[in-house]
Image (spheres, rainbow, N blue to C red):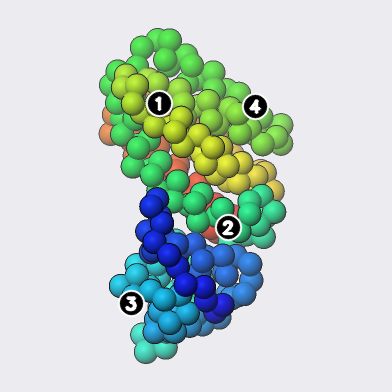
Amino acid sequence: MAGVKLAPARKEKLGDQLYGRILEEIVSGTYGEGDKLPSESQICRAFGVSRPTVREALMRLHADGLVATRQGSGTFVQKRPSGHLTRLAKVSDIAGILRCMEVRMALEGRAAALAAERRGGAELQRIEAALAALRTSLEAGAVPVGADHEFHRAVAAASGNALFAEMLEMLEETIHQSMTVALGITHAGSKERARRVVEEHEAIAEAIRRGDAEGAGLAMNYHLHRARQRVTDGGREL
């Protein structure tokens, strides 16, 4: 593992930086599926970080399903993200995309729940118009980043709390990038995968339509979780 000493950054913890560096080496193919990663002590020395920082980074990679620990043997690469991923995003951007998706799960699930409780006719119409555009584009074999972004903005606006929409605007560049990657991978997959993406959005809209706050929050979080999996799934059908 080619180590470069990590320096604390005002906006990024050492654990996040190390997570990104190891992820880069997995995505780039430095470590392939089944390969053993260096030991915790080796990573500590290579990057000049503490053991808790290394464990934090490895735990996140484990949560992403990218590595697995075998007791007494070490940590091994369990899967490598799809080759489409590196064609759709710079390797150095991938960790940021995945972190953005984590934030969106915390933010948009609550926004969807509130939308189910507070939406009016105009807000529901906006959500359904965006859903129709997304469905039409995916069925036509296109990559509907604009329609997808509009759907999520419409849900945030329907929450009745302007801060949700403002927070999405703050993340707009990274959200747009993450949608481009996730939908690009979907586009490169099967029609069944595209159909599942449409169904995930339909479930969110339907829960909001019937005023089911819990269902809307769960549907949104499920969709974002699956979108994140599609980024890291190594081309598997999800």
Q: Classify 59 as above or below 41.
A: above
Amino acid on which disc 1 is placed: Ala
User: Which residue is identified by label 2?
Assistant: 92
- Give the percent coordinates (x, y) of residue 174: 52, 41
- Give the percent coordinates (x, y) of residue 108: 38, 35
- Give the percent coordinates (x, y) of residue 106: 33, 42
Choose top left, top right, bottom left or bottom right for residue 65.
Answer: bottom left
User: Which residue is identified by label 4?
Assistant: 136
Which-is-in-front pick, marks 2 and 1? Answer: 2
Q: Quote the CA–CA distance across marks 2 and 3.
A: 23 Å
Q: Which of marks 2 and 3 is nearer the N terminus?
A: 3
Q: Quote the CA–CA distance across marks 4 and 2.
A: 33 Å
Q: Which of marks 1 and 3 is nearer the N terminus?
A: 3
- Give the percent coordinates (x, y) of residue 82: 62, 59
User: Which residue is identified by label 3?
Assistant: 51
Element type at marker 2?
helix
Q: Classify 226 as above or below 170.
A: below
At a point 61% along the width and 34% down the height, the residue shown is 145
Q: Residues within 10 Å of mark 2 (few under 14, many from 20)?
A: some
Task: Tell me if label 2 and label 1 are in contact, CB under 8 Å.
Answer: no
Given residues 104 and 10, the one toward you in this image is: 10
Element type at marker 3?
helix
Task: Tell me if label 1 and label 3 are in contact, CB under 8 Å.
Answer: no
Amino acid on which disc 3 is placed: Arg
Q: Quote the CA–CA distance across marks 1 and 3.
A: 39 Å
Element type at marker 1?
helix
